[in-house]
Image (spheres, rainbow, N blue to C red):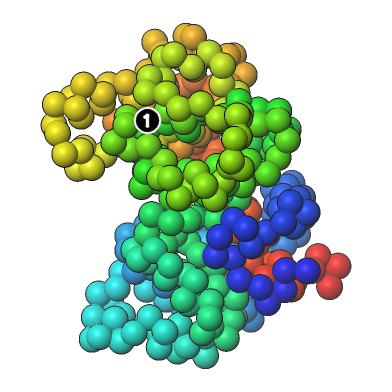
Amino acid sequence: MLKGRHLVTPDDLSIEEIFELMELAQDIIKSPDDYSTFCKNKLLGTLFFEPSTRTRLSFEAAMLRLGGSIIGFSESGSSSTAKGESLIDTIRTVGCYSDIIAMRHPQEGSATLARQYSYVPIINAGDGGHYHPTQTLTDLLTILETKGTFGNLNIGLCGDLKFGRTVHSLLKTMNKYKNNKFYLISPEELKIPNYVMKLTFDEGADNFVENERLEEVISELDVLYMTRVQKERFFNEADYVRLKDSYILSPEKLKAAKEDMIILHPLPRVNEIELEVDKDPRAKYFDQARYGMFVRMALIMKLLGVEKNA
């Protein structure tokens, strides 16, 4: 069903297709060695025009663990972009050599442009502050593995909700499932943009709450998705100083949280989750990073049309 398709936004996948990906990813988790030759003689092109650790390496690890190979670059300066080559020409060229492309680019809409000219499936690995659909698949697999469901959850999204593409993608996707309520926790300066809200929620929707203080809602949450509050986004340093400590998760703040709440973070973190929190069994962000590799293995297989019974 997904063979030859592109994944650029969360809307490119139906609920049924997401379920298929989750099922395959869970099977890979159980028996990873069974999948070690499924992409033999296949090539993944990794085009990363801006820095990345987890996303790039997890894509590369995913393809290698499927028995495939990798070509690509990890910064635009090491590609012909530095000579003035257009994104369209880069995509067309790499498509001549590879079977599938994962691309990260700082410009919003770049993945939409790439899909129009690519000979092979394009996977959006992040386009500016727009969307990051494979991080969302990673988040979904983590939620499924830990909570066992995508519905009936109170989900807190905390920190930079304005520029956080992972937040935009997760919010849009989780709103497709029944009885989820969202707590949007951020300073006024970093609220979710109106265009994202309009694309996510129907007019008059009552399944979200906007709040500036994590402490006021943490006891309600089943999932807490942390992001970094970025000092450079504030016009007034006094506002940053006033709000920054509200978005640092500490063991003290966790005393009010449910015992089975899970803590997620797309990483990298700076200081928004204290190191002591890592010892808490509710901290799932490094499990989350591991699940990212498995869900990308499943996605690569589906887009290439590689079947387990083939």
Q: Residue at the location (39% across, 10% down)? A: 252
Which quadrant of the rendered structure holds the C terminus?
A: bottom right
Q: Is residue 310 above or below residue 35?
A: below
Please name the residue shown 72% across and 62% down the image.
35
* Residue at the image point whose x is 42% and y is 84% from the top: 88
Between 136 and 60, the one nearer to me in the picture:
136
Q: Give residue 64's position: percent from left, percent from top.
A: 57, 66
Q: Quadrant of the N terminus?
A: bottom right
* Residue at x 59% of width, y 56% of height: 10
Q: Is residue 219 above or below residue 188?
A: above
Horizontal side, residue 157 vs residue 297: left or right:
left
Please state which amino acid type lies under the numbered disc 1: Ser
Residue 182 position by quadrant:
top right
Q: Residue furthest front?
A: 204
Regarding mark 1 in the picture, which secondary structure is present there?
Answer: loop
Number of marks drawn: 1
> Would you identify the image quadrant in which residue 107 lies?
bottom left
Q: Is residue 226 visible?
A: yes
Farthest residue in the right direction?
309
Q: Residue under circle 1?
A: 186
Picture quadrant where residue 65 is located: bottom right
Q: On screen, 37 above or below 93?
A: above
Tell me: 166 left or right of 250. Answer: right
Give the x, y percent position of residue 306.
75, 72
Q: Is residue 51 above or below residue 138?
A: below
**Label 1: how many Cα within 10 Å (few below 14, some 14–19, many 20+):** many
Estimate the x, y position of residue 4 in percent, counting from the top left. Answer: 68, 77
Q: Position of residue 111 (x, y in %)?
A: 47, 70
